Amino acid sequence: MSTWDSTRPPPSMALTPARRWRAIWRFAVLALGLMAGLLALLLARGAERVSHAGARRYSPYVVRAYSGFLLRVIGLPLTVRGTMVQGRAAWVANHASWLDIFVLNAITPALFVAKAEVADWPGIGPLARMAGTVFIRRDRRDAAAQTHVLAAEFRRGHRLVFFPEGTSTDSTLVLPFKPTLFQAFLAPDMPRNMRVQPVSVRYHAPQGADPRFYGWWGGMDFASHFLRVLGQGRQGRVTVILHPPIACDPDKGRKALAAASEAHVRAGFEAS
């Protein structure tokens, strides 16, 4: 998988003393909340193993609660437009930042699909595993096995979230969607009546800040970007647009499904 990068350097990560202190106290609040959340998550997973054969019936709600908590602590307003599809469906969204995980989780309990390498990232990997992230290897040789894993999650009633751009951006554009991912939605062992709901995620930078303020891409350091967002006083905002669902029709193929999804996401992104 290639990583997108900008031709322009990212915004400065420098923090003023006031922003540094703001970042510190917000981080402390989030850390306390995380400890409580992890305890609740462990209890939820224990209950799921006993009563639901491991299916995640409770734990996604814990993740959702913490995601909303994080957005409130940092002061980032979230606006949601459109109607959430019911039943078996996958969300496909543009990917701009580590914030996407919390923004989308704050809307609905969901499991994210990520590249297998994320599982080994220090700090992030263990948390992602606890939150139920589905890790896949983007290798055609593993396509059948990965499809089986995804189909099993859908049958358990889980909503899965995909980022078909295959990388994150600076938050000011939408990259072409990779059709390969969409083949899984058309596989014979997928549940019937599967649908894909395109989702546009649009960040608006704080007044006077670089428009790419919330974007996290390329080789940007996570800790520096995380602290910069935490240290911001008056935040910008984020808008999420839920588009009408698209039926997964094998006769039309993965390229048509990817193109239709991308068109919806791009239109919503540019209009918001």
Image (cartoon, helix red, strand yellow):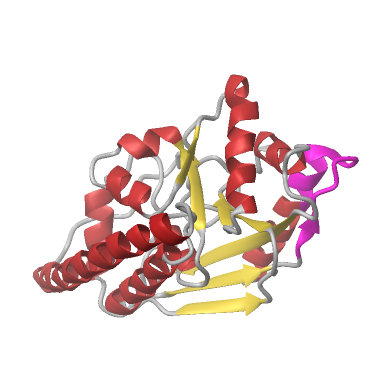
Residue 230 locus on image (x, y percent) = 24, 67
Which residue shows up at 54% across the image and 66% down it?
A: 202
The residue lying toward the viewer, choosing from 150 and 55, is: 55
Q: Is residue 224 left or right of residue 113?
A: left
Residue 122, image quadrant: top left
* Residue 173 part of the magenta segment: no
Q: Is residue 210 left or right of residue 182?
A: left
Considering only vertical position in the picture, is 157 above or below 235?
A: above
Residue 254 locus on image (x, y percent) = 78, 39
Q: Which residue ends up furthest to the front in the rendered image?
A: 50
Can residue 6 be seen here? The reply is yes
Q: Which residues are magenta?
A: 245-260
The residue lying toward the viewer, choosing from 5 and 1, is: 1
Which residue shows up at 56% across the image and 54% down it?
A: 161
Can residue 10 be seen here? The reply is no
Residue 177, image quadrant: top right
Residue 149 locus on image (x, y percent) = 57, 39
Residue 144 locus on image (x, y percent) = 65, 28
* Residue 250 part of the magenta segment: yes
